[in-house]
Image (spheres, grey):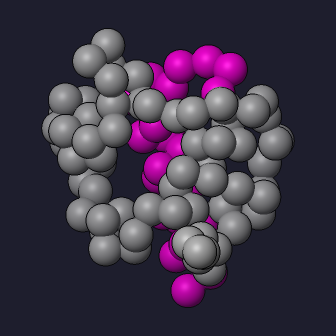
């Protein structure tokens, strides 16, 4: 039996803002499961292309691949929410 380990973070629910739509919730959950080491590599000054390459979960059309989402996540939204998640984790540490 495979067990999914829940992250110690709960940015999905504790982000402190409007819950948003299903895609917003899924994106926050996606970042909850991103390893801290990987997240620490992120640099705000990277180009959008570099961010997409770094994450390695973007489609050829340039959208983040998220299952069960109502809409596509562009890199600008990805960056904004990622940076919010980084700040959330810093506050929780």
Quadrant into which the N terminus falls: bottom right
| Left or right of 75, for residue 38 | left
| Residue stretch in magenta | 69-93
Residue 92 position, x and y percent, is 62, 81
Front residue of 2 and 77: 2
Front residue of 43 and 62: 62
The prevailing secondary structure element of the residues shown in magenta is helix
Residue at x 26% of width, y 18% of height: 60
Residue 70 position, x and y percent, is 68, 20
- Asked whether 91 falls inside the magenta stretch, the response is yes
Kindly tell me whether residue 50 is visible in this rendering: yes
Residue at x 26% of width, y 35% of height: 52
**Can you name the residue that lies furthest to the top here?**
61
Quarter assignment of residue 56: top left
| Left or right of 41, for residue 2 | right
Residue at x 47% of width, y 50% of height: 82
């Amino acid at each position: 039996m495979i067990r999914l380990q829940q992250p110690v973070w709960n940015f999905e629910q504790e982000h402190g803002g409007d819950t948003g739509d299903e895609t917003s919730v899924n994106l926050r959950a996606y970042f909850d499961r991103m390893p801290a080491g990987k997240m620490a590599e992120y640099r705000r000054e990277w180009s959008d292309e570099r961010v997409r390459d770094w994450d390695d979960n973007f489609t050829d059309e340039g959208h983040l691949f998220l299952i069960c989402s109502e809409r596509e996540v562009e890199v600008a939204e990805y960056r904004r929410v990622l940076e919010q998640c980084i700040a959330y984790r810093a506050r929780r540490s």
